[in-house]
Image (tube, rainbow, N blue to C red):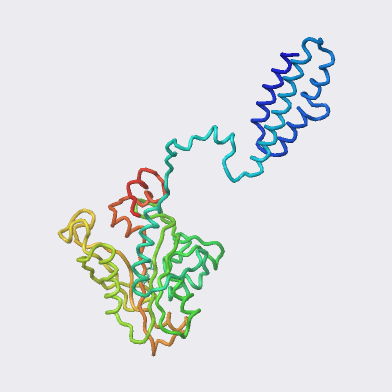
Amino acid sequence: MKESIETIKKKFNSELAAAYDLETLEKVRVRFLGKKGEITSLMKSLGQVTAEEKPLLGKELNQFKKSAEKMLEERKTELKSNTSLSLWEKERLDVTLPGKPFKIGRKHPLISVLKEMEEIFTCMGFQVVEGPDVEMDYYNFEALNIPQDHPARDMQDSFYITPDVLLRTHTSPVQIRTMEAQAPTLPVRVIAPGKVYRRDDDLTHSPMFHQVEGLVVDKGISMGDLKGTLLLFAREMFGSDREIRLRPSYFPFTEPSAEVDILCIICDGRGCRTCGDSGWMEILGSGMVHPKVLRISGYDPENVTGYAFGMGVERIAMLKYGIDDIRTFYNNDLRMLKQHQIS
Ligand code: DAH
């Protein structure tokens, strides 16, 4: 009998400690104090012990029953007010222990550069707009005055989905979409960042990369506005004494067109391997929006003019951080991501 009491005490204590909710607690109560409960049964069997033992065992059993009832009651109150740490948690949680250090995620260096570019242009009054990655041939080529036989239209160079739908090969189609939606309201002053896709894959080309397109349309916009804006951009991005130069070029959707170089950020114009000894690095394509492009998008080229530019984000990031393999951006190698903790 005496041993049974001890065993049941131990059992009761451990089951009580493991009761984390009211439902389990009630089960514990029934198991020990219910009509057929273990303590109740023990009390019933008191009749079988000798008259000598009875008073002592009876007393002990009664005390155990009372304390069990009290403990169950206390545990119940505690579980009901679950706002504070339970007794169980208090015993196991040492709040004075030092916390576990956790790693904080950061922006990918490429996204960080993209955001920096967005910031520079929004500070100059540009609005950020977006267009679809899956684009219609009309917006990607046709409306941009890119002729049917232009090499960019080749199946070899672009990812076609159907004969009229493809993954956009540049962000320039957003120029058309923006003007169409806004015409004839002036001014148009937007940048369009996003992913573009080409069938290319080597050290400096990836089948998917990022561009930022710029477009300004208003009365009296000139090549001077384009140059001033891009000079300010280059200085914000690469340092306040950076020089730029415009070289005549050709794009079907601008006339005249220019490619823009910055003074090499490695050698400052003296000539090095990175700039191919020229002292300059090409960073973007640009020009005055072609009259045909303005007209097809709802603006009258007799009354308004505009400029546009487009640049590769990976290229800018590679120049800025001296990265020579474009795939570095997509490998998600933690060592590289840690090395370029930009912000
Ligand atoms: N879309 C051209 C490309 O991907 C870049 C470009 C050149 C954009 C001239 C323009 C521009 O807006 O005016 O190569």
> Relative to residue 246, is residue 71 depicted above or below?
above
Residue lying farthest to the left in this orientation: 270
Residue at (59, 34) in percent of width and height: 88
User: Residue 160 at x, y = what percent?
Assistant: 52, 62
Which image quadrant: the N terminus?
A: top right
Q: In which quarter of the image is ligand 1?
A: bottom left
User: Residue 102 at x, y = what percent?
Assistant: 43, 42
Pick the residue in front: 68 or 243: 68
Residue lying farthest to the bottom in this orientation: 302
* Left-right relation of 86 to 269: right
> Relative to residue 343, is residue 174 depicted above or below?
below
Residue at (39, 69) in percent of width and height: 213
* Left-right relation of 177 to 75: left
Pick the residue in front: 319 or 335: 335
Quarter-wise, where is residue 99 in the image?
A: top left
User: Residue 191 at x, y = what percent?
Assistant: 40, 71
Which image quadrant: the C terminus?
A: bottom left
Residue at (39, 75) in percent of width and height: 215
